[in-house]
C-alpha cells in the first residue's frame, strides 16, 4: 500500500475516532439532556449567523437589536450550559471535534499532488530596473535595505515619492526603452500589476519583491512576505523563471482579482479610506438589499447570473473549502479565471453560505472570460485593491502564460486545498480493504 494512502487511511480513522469521542462525551455525561445540548448549540449558531446578516443589511433600531442578538445569543447559551453544569462538556466536545474535522479533511485530500509549475533557466540580468515604494508594508523598503541590496546587483532603482506621484507604467516603459532586461516592483499588488503589464507586453522578466502589506500575488508565487530581502537576493543569485497568467478587466491588467458590486461600491466612497467600518455600515445595507448601486448581470461559461450583490473575478481560481470560497491560489498557470458570484436574499441564505452549504445563490465558475453588465453606463470596479470605474459591459479575460516571473529556485508551495468533509466517504476510506 502506498505510504500516502496509508497516512490518509489512518487520518480517516483518527477523525472518526475523535468525532465518536466527542459525541460519547456528550451522550455519556449529559444523558437525555445531550439532545437539548446539541439542538441549542445548532440553533444558537443559526440565530447568530442570521443576526450578523441583519447587522450588515439593516439600519437603525433593527441593526442595534440584531447586534445585541449576535452578541447575546452565544453568551446566553454558554451561561445556560454553565448553569446546568454542562459547560465543561461542551468545551471538551469542541476540543475533540475540531481536530476530528481537520484530520477528516486531510484524509480526504487527493493523494497525488499536482505537478509543480514548469521552471525555466533565468539568464543574468544586465540592466535590471526596479521601482520601490518606501511607504509600502509600513516601510519594508528601508527596514530591509532593499534599494541598497538591489543596487549591489547593478539594478537601477527608482524610489517613489508620495508627495510627487509618478506614473509607474511610464517609468517601466522608459526603462525598457533604455535597454532594461528585468523589471521589478517592491510595493503593493496594484503597482505590481501596472508594471507586470509592461513586462508582459515587452516579454521582459518580472521580479516581485514582497514589500507590500498583503502582497497576495507574491504569496501565491511562494515568496516569503516576511523576508523580502531574501526573495530579492535569491532571485538574482539563484533564480528561475515561471510562466504565469495575467487577468485583464477592460484594458487593465490584474494579478489577483477584480471585484464588482458591494465591495467595489464601498471602496469608491471618499470616506472609506478614513473610516472604513462606518462607511461599510452606512453603505452596505442598500447594496445588500439592492436598494442602491447598479444591478449587475454576469455571463460566464454559458451561465447567466442575474442581480448578484457581488462578483469576484480572479486570475486563476482560489482554493475552495471555506464558506467564502477564498484562500490561496494553488496554481497561477491554469489558463482559467476564477469567478464567484453571490446572490443572498435574506438571512436563511446568509446562514447557509456561512455554514458552507451550497445553494443557488453562490455560483463558482472557471471560464476563460466573463462579461459583467449592469443597468448603468458605468460601474465601480476594485482592481487589485484599487478603486476604478469602467464603462459597461466589462469584459474580463485570462491571458495564459503572459508573464515571465523571476523567482527564487527554493520557495514555498501553496498548501493543498482541503475538500469539504464527507463522513460517508471518510468511513469508506477508513475501513476499505484495499
Image (cartoon, rainbow, N blue to C red):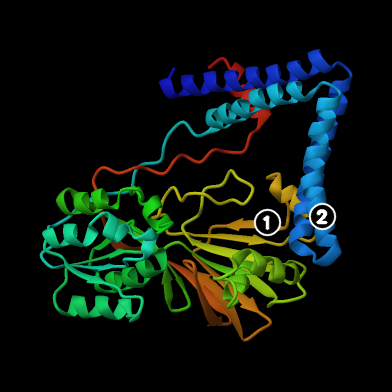
Q: How many marks?
A: 2
Q: Which residue is mark 1?
A: 362
Horizontal arrangement in the rendering, residue 244 relative to residue 302 (left or right): left
Question: What distance separates the C-alpha of mark 1 from that of mark 2?
Answer: 24 Å
Horizontal arrangement in the rendering, residue 106 relative to residue 94 (left or right): left
- Residue 22 at x, y = what percent? 70, 20
Name of the residue lying farthest toward the bottom: 377
For the residue pair 26 and 71, the one nearer the viewer reads as 71
Write down the quadrant of residue 32 in the picture.
Answer: top right
The residue sitting at 30% across, 44% down in the picture is 411
Label 2: which secondary element: helix
For the residue pair 313 and 431, the one nearer the viewer reads as 313
In the displayed structure, would residue 16 be above or below residue 307?
Answer: above
Q: Which residue is mark 2?
A: 66
The residue sitting at 70% across, 66% down in the picture is 281
- Residue 170 at x, y = what percent? 29, 81
Which labelled disc corresponds to residue 381?
Answer: none
The N terminus lies in quadrant: top left
For the residue pair 63 and 235, the one nearer the viewer reads as 63
Mark 1 neighbour class, 10 Å CA radius: few under 14, some 14 to 19, many 20 or more: many
The residue sitting at 17% across, 60% down in the picture is 148
- Residue 96 at x, y = what percent? 65, 23
Choose mark 1 or mark 2, whichever is in front. 2
**Upstream in sequence: badge 1 or badge 2:** 2
Amino acid at each position: 500500500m502506498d505510504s500516502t494512502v496509508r497516512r490518509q487511511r489512518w487520518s480517516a480513522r483518527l477523525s472518526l475516532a475523535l468525532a465518536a469521542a466527542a459525541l460519547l462525551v456528550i451522550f455519556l455525561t449529559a444523558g437525555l439532556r445531550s439532545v437539548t445540548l446539541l439542538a441549542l448549540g445548532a440553533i444558537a449558531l443559526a440565530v447568530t449567523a442570521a443576526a450578523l446578516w441583519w447587522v450588515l443589511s439593516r439600519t437603525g433600531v433593527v441593526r442595534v437589536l440584531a447586534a445585541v442578538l449576535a452578541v447575546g445569543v452565544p453568551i446566553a447559551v454558554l451561561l445556560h450550559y454553565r448553569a446546568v453544569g454542562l459547560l465543561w462538556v461542551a468545551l471538551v466536545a469542541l476540543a475533540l471535534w475540531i481536530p476530528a474535522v481537520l484530520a477528516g479533511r486531510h484524509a480526504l485530500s487527493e493523494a497525488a499532488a499536482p505537478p509543480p509549475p514548469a521552471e525555466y533557466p533565468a539568464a543574468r540580468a544586465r540592466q535590471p530596473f526596479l521601482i520601490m515604494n518606501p511607504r509600502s508594508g509600513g516601510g519594508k523598503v528601508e527596514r530591509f535595505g532593499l534599494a541598497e541590496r538591489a543596487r549591489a546587483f547593478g539594478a537601477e532603482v527608482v524610489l517613489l515619492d508620495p508627495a510627487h506621484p509618478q506614473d509607474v507604467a511610464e517609468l517601466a516603459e522608459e526603462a525598457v526603452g533604455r535597454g532594461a532586461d528585468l523589471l521589478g516592483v517592491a510595493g503593493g499588488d496594484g503597482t505590481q500589476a501596472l508594471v507586470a503589464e509592461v513586462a508582459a507586453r515587452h516579454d521582459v522578466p518580472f521580479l516581485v519583491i514582497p514589500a507590500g502589506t498583503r502582497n497576495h500575488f507574491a504569496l501565491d508565487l511562494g515568496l516569503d512576505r516576511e523576508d523580502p530581502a531574501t526573495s530579492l537576493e535569491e532571485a538574482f543569485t539563484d533564480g528561475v523563471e515561471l510562466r504565469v497568467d495575467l487577468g485583464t478587466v477592460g484594458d487593465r491588467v490584474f494579478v489577483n482579482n477584480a471585484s464588482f458590486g458591494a465591495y467595489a461600491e464601498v471602496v469608491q466612497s471618499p470616506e472609506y479610506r478614513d473610516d472604513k467600518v462606518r462607511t461599510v455600515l452606512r453603505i452596505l445595507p442598500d447594496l445588500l438589499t439592492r436598494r442602491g448601486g447598479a444591478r449587475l448581470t454576469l455571463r460566464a461559461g454559458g451561465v447567466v447570473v442575474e442581480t448578484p450583490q457581488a462578483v469576484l473575478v480572479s486570475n486563476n481560481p482560489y482554493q475552495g473549502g471555506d464558506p467564502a470560497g477564498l484562500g490561496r491560489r494553488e496554481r497561477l498557470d491554469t489558463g482559467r479565471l476564477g469567478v464567484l458570484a453571490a446572490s443572498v436574499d435574506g438571512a436563511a441564505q446568509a446562514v447557509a453560505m456561512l455554514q458552507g452549504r451550497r445553494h443557488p445563490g453562490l455560483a463558482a465558475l472557471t471560464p476563460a472570460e466573463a462579461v459583467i453588465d449592469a443597468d448603468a453606463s458605468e460601474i465601480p470596479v476594485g482592481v487589485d485593491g484599487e478603486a476604478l470605474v469602467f464603462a459597461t459591459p466589462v469584459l474580463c479575460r485570462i491571458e495564459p502564460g503572459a508573464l515571465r516571473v523571476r523567482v527564487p529556485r527554493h520557495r514555498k508551495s501553496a498548501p493543498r486545498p482541503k475538500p469539504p468533509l464527507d463522513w460517508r466517504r471518510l468511513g469508506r476510506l477508513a475501513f476499505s480493504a484495499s
